[in-house]
Amino acid sequence: MINHIENEYAKFWIEKDILYFVYKNGISIDQSVAMRVVEDRLLLQKGQEFLILCDMRGVKSVSKSARNYLAIEGSTLIKAVALLVNNPLTNTISGFYVKTSNPAITTQIFTEEYGALNFLNNHISK
């Protein structure tokens, strides 16, 4: 049984009904990277919906086509997403994604993991 996946772009694991998704340091996300991470995430999920904690702290850029892909096709089997950021760059990238790509699922941005987990835990019963 697969309980974690790691590729050259990110690592994923499931813990207490939350799927943790951590991009590796210095990653630039284009559409091919977005497609690969979504493919691996769906493999790990095995058809089940999950809440996602997506750690964006290592991301240095995201292309428009990747943002659009993640907002639509990349929202498959996701209940809600907490984006974890730690600097003005990742905050700007994430904010731009939320405002312009209009993801199909509830998405919020956090600078602290504690706040992100509280947000996701409030969605567990929904």
Image (spheres, grey):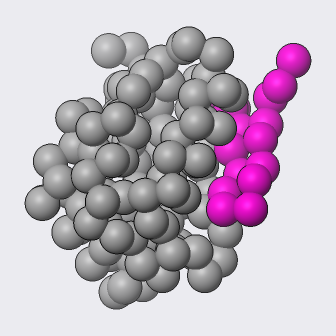
Q: Quadrant of residue 72?
A: top left
Q: Taking 90 as reference, is 121 above or below it?
A: above
82 or 60: nearer the viewer: 60
Q: Is residue 12 magenta?
A: yes
Question: Residue placed at 58% from the left, 74% from the top?
Answer: 27
Left or right of 58 in this view: 79: left
**Quadrant including the N terminus:** top right
Instruction: List x then y, in percent, for residue 64.
Output: 27, 66
Identify which residue, 12 or 35, lies in the foreground.
Answer: 35
Is residue 112 among what the camera can see? no
Q: Residue furthest bottom?
A: 88
Query: Left or right: 97 with respect to 102?
Result: right
Q: Residue at x 52, y 40 (%)?
A: 38
Q: Residue at x 42, y 78 (%)?
A: 61
Q: Is residue 14 visible?
A: yes
Placement of 46 over or under 40, stated as above or below: above
Highlighted magenta segment, given as a residue range: 1-16
Residue 4: % across, % down: 79, 37
- Quadrant location, the C terminus: top left
Q: Nearer the viewer, residue 3 or 65?
A: 65
Specify whether 67 is left or right of 115. left
State left or right for residue 68 relative to residue 62: left
Q: How many marks?
A: 0
* Residue at point 60%, 63% (across, down): 23
In this picture, is 31 found above or below 106? Answer: below
Q: Is residue 104 above or below residue 17?
A: below
